[in-house]
């Protein structure tokens, strides 16, 4: 069973492009529809928890599903499986990139990709707002955080997040 | 040592530092891996000066377009860039520990957690902060980009494709990369 879990999450780790919300449909198809490892209801419950706990969503979900399937060991195996192939791929790319630094084609490739990534960031902001905010208050708080982040260069972003969390606890 | 791609001469100390940075960054990643970008930029580029801002944008862009979750890719690439193979390995372990611990605890006390309405509010507040910070970092990166006609056109096209045509981002990145190799200029 542990080996099965490991292989399954290896597979999911690689097809999960872009992380975050992109992974729900993939996990749902594999774990709920194809393998029947957990029920529809449990899956929705896990998603709601993975979204509201710290840590990347895909990894949270993998850990949770792994734990449900075979306890703590299952959780560890699922999480490592989820990390494993992206880690290897990224490592090879990182080694290649260090060599390619001065290559002209790589530079052109990079300068174009950096522009597209700007749009990806905008989309991420849009999706986070659309998915998580249900009235106007979080938007106001985001605006304040944005201004604070741009204005106070010395402020540690982590402290800013903690402050936002506390404000959320009081005001939402 | 050269083969392992190390940028610094005293890796153990730096690896330990990276481990610590990625550990606490992972705790505050709410709403997906993208939340770690503003924090990492501040710590790695502005405070510790481990990476130049150009290098950071490069790391982020490449991490974003490869398969796998953004968080793992960022950790591996940054770790490798700064401290070689072991840097990459330890950064990855560091970001895995918080989710593993927290989720296992929640799974053990199944059900009780969700009654904490306060916890949801806290997370929503942090998410709002993340949205603000990611907007900020987008603006910063936008300002640093040296735009030419090609890049402006590319920006507009990918915006339309992603927001209105709702094309899968991977294809947009692929098209952009090909166009860049064909018509772009290195800068």
Image: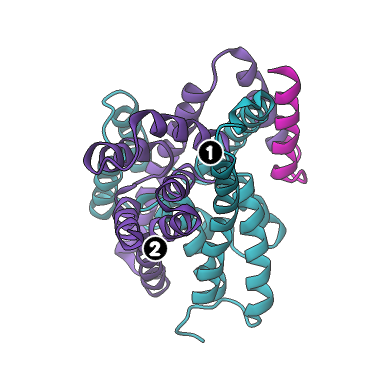
Labels 2 and 1 share a subunit: no
Q: Which chain is disc 2 placed on?
A: A
Residue B45, percent across and down? 64, 57
Q: What residue sits 55% from the left and 49% below the top?
A: B104
Residue A167, percent across and down? 75, 25
Give the farthest residue toward the bottom. Answer: B1
Using the image as rendered, state which of residue A33 and residue A155 is in the foreground: A33
Residue B116, percent across and down? 66, 27
Q: Is residue B23 above or below residue A37?
A: below
Give the farthest residue toward the top. Answer: A135
The residue that disc 2 covers is A84
Using the image as rendered, state which of residue A151 and residue B101 is in the foreground: B101
Which class describes the residues within 10 Å of circle 1: few (<14), some (14-19), or many (20+)? many
In which quadrant of the rendered image does the N terminus of chain A lie?
bottom left
**Colour representing chain A:** purple
Look at the image and give the residue range highlighted in magenta.
Answer: A151-172
Disc assigned to residue B138: 1
Using the image as rendered, state which of residue A61 and residue A172 is in the foreground: A61
């Amino acid at each position: 069973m542990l080996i099965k879990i490991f292989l399954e999450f290896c597979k999911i780790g690689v097809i999960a492009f872009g992380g975050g919300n992109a992974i729900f449909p993939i996990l749902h198809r594999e774990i709920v529809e194809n393998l029947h490892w957990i029920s529809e209801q449990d899956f929705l419950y896990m998603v709601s928890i993975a979204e509201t706990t710290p840590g990347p969503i895909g990894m949270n979900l993998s850990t949770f599903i792994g734990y449900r399937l075979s306890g703590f060991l299952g959780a560890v195996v699922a999480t490592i499986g989820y990390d494993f192939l992206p880690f290897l791929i990224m490592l090879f790319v990182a080694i290649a990139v260090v060599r390619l630094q001065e290559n002209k084609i790589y530079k052109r490739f990079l300068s174009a990709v950096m522009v597209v990534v700007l749009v990806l960031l905008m989309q991420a902001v849009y999706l986070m707002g659309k998915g998580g905010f249900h009235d106007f208050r979080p938007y106001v708080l985001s605006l304040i955080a944005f201004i604070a982040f741009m204005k106070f260069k010395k402020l540690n972003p982590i402290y800013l997040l903690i402050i936002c969390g506390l404000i959320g606890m009081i005001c939402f | 040592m050269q083969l392992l791609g190390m940028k610094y001469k005293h890796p153990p100390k730096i690896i330990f530092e990276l481990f610590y940075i990625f550990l606490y960054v992972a705790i505050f990643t709410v709403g997906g891996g993208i939340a770690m970008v503003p924090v990492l930029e501040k710590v790695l580029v502005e405070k510790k000066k481990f990476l130049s801002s150009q290098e950071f944008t490069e790391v982020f862009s490449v991490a974003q377009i490869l398969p796998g979750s953004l968080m793992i890719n960022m950790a591996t690439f940054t770790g490798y860039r700064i401290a070689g193979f072991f840097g990459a390995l330890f950064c990855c372990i560091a970001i895995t520990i918080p989710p593993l611990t927290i989720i296992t605890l929640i799974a053990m006390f199944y059900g009780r957690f969700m009654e904490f309405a306060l916890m949801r509010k806290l997370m929503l507040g942090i998410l709002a902060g993340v949205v603000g910070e990611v907007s900020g970092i987008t603006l910063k990166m936008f300002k640093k980009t040296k735009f030419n006609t090609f890049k402006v056109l590319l920006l507009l096209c990918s915006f339309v494709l992603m927001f209105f045509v709702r094309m899968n981002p991977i294809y947009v990145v692929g098209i952009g990369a090909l166009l860049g190799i064909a018509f772009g200029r290195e800068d």
